[in-house]
Image: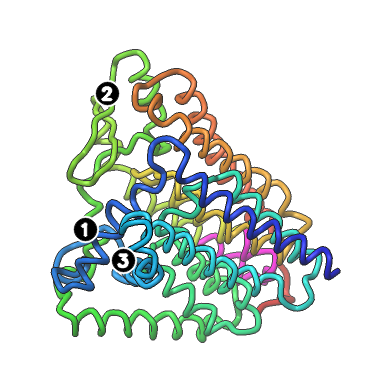
Amino acid sequence: MKLRLLALWAAFLTVHVLVAWLGWVYPSQPMGDVHLVYEPWSRAALSGEGVVGVTESWVYPQLALAPMMLTQLFAWPLTGLVGPAAAYLIGWAILVTLLDALGFAVLLARGGAASRRAAGWFWTVAILLLGPIAMYRIDAVTVPLAVIGGCWLVRRPAVATALLTVGAWIKIWPGALVLAAIITARTRMRMLLSAVAVTAGVVVMLLLLGAEGRLLGFLTEQTGRGLQVEAVAATGFLWAALFGAASIEYSFEILTFQIVAPGADAASAALTPIMVVMVLALTALGALKAVRGARFPRLMPPLALALVVTLIVANKVGSPQFQTWLIAPVILWILFDRARSVTPALLVLLLCALTCLVYPLTYDALLQAELLPVLVLTARNLTLILLLVVALRALLRVPTGNIRTAP
């Protein structure tokens, strides 16, 4: 048993070192966001020049600035040796590795049961297949928080929900896990109070800092975005671009590549309402199953995964780091219902591999609407839809009864 755990730990840490290094050698600057935007944002906040999310509207929830600022602490000793940009990149890789190691330790606690080891191997392979984007984005910070929160849902529901809520104030997606847990668990009131308390604390802190009208800027800043090239809804427009009927242009306002074509703006505008409807429908279905006595271990994983996949499929943004969101729900599925987790786990690993092939490996060719990357991205987006169908099918097949096992 100890040898198995040691081998798993060795693989996990080796993959982090390898993936961190690949960020330096892969094309298309997969580390770009870290040193081009995270570092200036954090430096400005520390020097008193302005705090994103407080003195100006920001695309991220305000707690996302905390890990960006913390990275400066790791980078400071290295600045004189490798320069500020490289030092910050190394500091970011160290921070993500330490957070992942903490999440991994919680995951493998209690003797490293077979389901936990399987989840650990899944996490390790997912990072390897996804590549540098699994580490060099703010989303990477939320993954270990979600894993720890998921592992503690049964024994420490209030603490688990607090962690997940903190994660949602860094990047919104962990809120889907909070919603799924509150719907499916008998301790939902404790969870709800915990989530409300954390949110109230964050809001009060931000108001005291002077955020006021910028409190929900991470929501309002997204409303004017166009259809990003990698979004699922952009797939058809990409094929149109292949034949010259659409184009791909860079938006200097939001620093991303978007589709320019007849109907693209209408498709982008329709996606948010569609997402809201889908989330409400899944919430109603999960609540109906819970009321009818569905067991927590069967109900929570497919509901959580379906909600998270919906946030990706119905999103006008299709950033590659979104695939990291899928890691935690599948880990929970492996822990709670291992026998039925194989198909979603394999699909997520396939999604990680396809995403890395798109970004960063063939991204430059994708921006030229060349056939190979368009084919790969189409396969990735179709796999996302398939994963949603698999999660929804599992959710619909969750049995109901009078006896429930819940945290």
Image position, residue 105 (x, y; %): 65, 73
Task: From the image, tell me which residue sits under label 1.
Answer: 220
> Secondary structure under badge 3?
loop
Number of numbered discs on residues:
3
CA distance for labels 3 and 1: 11 Å
Q: The disc labelled 2 sits on which kind of residue?
A: Ser
Judged by depth in the image, the label closer to the viewer, 3 or 1, is 3
- Residue at 57% over, 82% down: 157
Task: From the image, tell me which residue sits under label 3.
Answer: 61
Q: Is residue 292 magenta?
A: yes
Relative to residue 397, is residue 180 depicted above or below?
below
- The quadrant in which the C terminus is found is bottom right
- Residue at 27% over, 54% down: 37
Image position, residue 13 (x, y; %): 63, 60
Image position, residue 290 (x, y; %): 61, 70
Residue 247 is marked as 2
Q: Which residues are magenta?
A: 284-301
Q: Residue furthest top?
A: 243
- State which tag comes first along the sequence, 3 or 1: 3
Image position, residue 196 (x, y; %): 39, 82
Q: Is residue 331 magenta?
A: no
Q: Quadrant of residue 331?
A: bottom right
- Residue at 21% over, 39% down: 251
Q: The disc labelled 1 sits on which kind of residue?
A: Thr
How is the rendered protein coloured?
A: rainbow
> Secondary structure under badge 2?
strand
CA distance for labels 3 and 2: 31 Å
Taking depth in this image into account, of 259 and 39 the one nearest to the observer is: 39
Q: The disc labelled 3 sits on which kind of residue?
A: Pro
Relative to residue 374, is residue 329 depicted above or below?
below
- Dots 2, 1 in contact, CB < 8 A: no
